[in-house]
Image: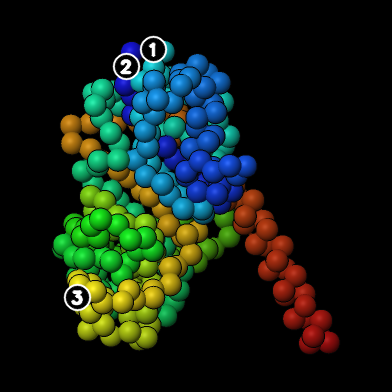
Amino acid sequence: MKRTALKIGYIGTNFHGFQRQPDLRTVEEELIYHLRKLDYIDDLKKSRFRIAGRTDAGVHSLGNVISFQSEKEVRVNEINNSLPDDIQILAKAPVRFGFKPRYAEMRQYRYLLFRDDLDIDKLNEVADVFKGTHNFTNFTKRFQKTTTRTIADIKINQPTLEDYHKRDFPNLHEPLTPIFVDIYGESFLWNMVRKMMRVFVDVATGKMEIEEVNKLLNPPEGAPRANIKVLEPDYLILMNIEYDGVKFQYDQYACERFTRDLTDSLCDLQKKYAIRESMIKSLKDLKGN
């Protein structure tokens, strides 16, 4: 029996989150079904099937991780040929039998902000406040034993069209250019990143002062929990998860295949966009007559 960790890429749009749920399509359910179908696993307890994290409905991934034990040699592209296009295995690594993907050395989340009214300087100012170790009890929906977490780094970046789009997809319609907010930490609370992003936006649009952010972090014991509304899950990507001593080997063909699938779906979205844009223009012309 060998234990293997797999790095999973998926588009979360058509999933009800990662975790298995009765009668709903989830990433975990799809993975288990196809691993069983290909005889990699049978009984989940015997195979010690484990996951790194449970992303919400609509959240995407390039780096979520699962692990399991199997007598069969894991072949990435055999699994990918069975999986639907919106889930693909991107990399694998041999791991020790006691490996638990939940306990990571570093996680990276990226949130994309599609707004043109954000003050970049204020976004960086908020980032500096969040860095370090804090009590994030106001930034989760669940009561947990400990709500102390450490943010190792936050990077704000707004790519140009040249950097972000035209170089790789010259034939596509000109897109909106988002602001990337990359957040790095060992672990995160449920909804923590999306609640953080609400605060980023509120400060960057002048709805909240930096002093208020400091009050949301490390609240006094017994203080009522603040009501921070989460931003949409659709613009959140789990970019990567890293482990001490574990080196993932990315499969070149698998990555190219997933890139093709993403490009094809992007072209379809661009066509849908063009149709709606044409209809809007026609309606404006009709109103003008």
Q: Tell me where residue 252 sits by quadrant.
A: top left
At horizontal 72% and vertical 74% (from top left) the residue drawn is: 280
Inspect the image, locate mark 3, and give the three-letter code of the amino acid beneath it: Pro
Q: Are marks 3 and 1 in contact (CB under 8 Å)?
A: no
Q: Give the camera-side residue of 208 and 136.
A: 136
| 113 displayed left or right of 268 | left
Q: Tell me where residue 81 sits by quadrant.
A: top right
Above-or-below relation of 172 to 32? below
Q: Give the camera-side residue of 64 and 204.
A: 64
Q: Position of residue 86 (x, y in %)?
A: 55, 40
Q: Are marks 1 and 2 in contact (CB under 8 Å)?
A: yes
Inspect the image, locate mark 2, and give the three-letter code of the amino acid beneath it: Lys
**Would you call the spot at circle 1 few (<14 residues within 10 Å), some (14-19), or many (20 or more)?**
few
Say whether disc 3 or disc 1 marks the residue closer to the N-terminus: 1
The residue tagged 2 is 2
**Quarter of the N terminus within the rendering:** top left
At horizontal 67% and vertical 62% (from top left) the residue drawn is: 274
- Mark 2 and mark 3: span between their CA atoms? 48 Å
The residue tagged 3 is 220
Inspect the image, locate mark 1, and give the three-letter code of the amino acid beneath it: Glu
Q: Tell me where residue 160 sits by quadrant.
A: bottom left
At horizontal 22% and vertical 84% (from top left) the residue drawn is: 211
Above-or-below relation of 64 to 94? below
- Mark 1 and mark 2: span between their CA atoms? 6 Å
The residue tagged 1 is 71
At horizontal 30% and vertical 36% (from top left) the residue drawn is: 101
Q: Helix or strand or loop: what does disc 1 sit on?
A: loop
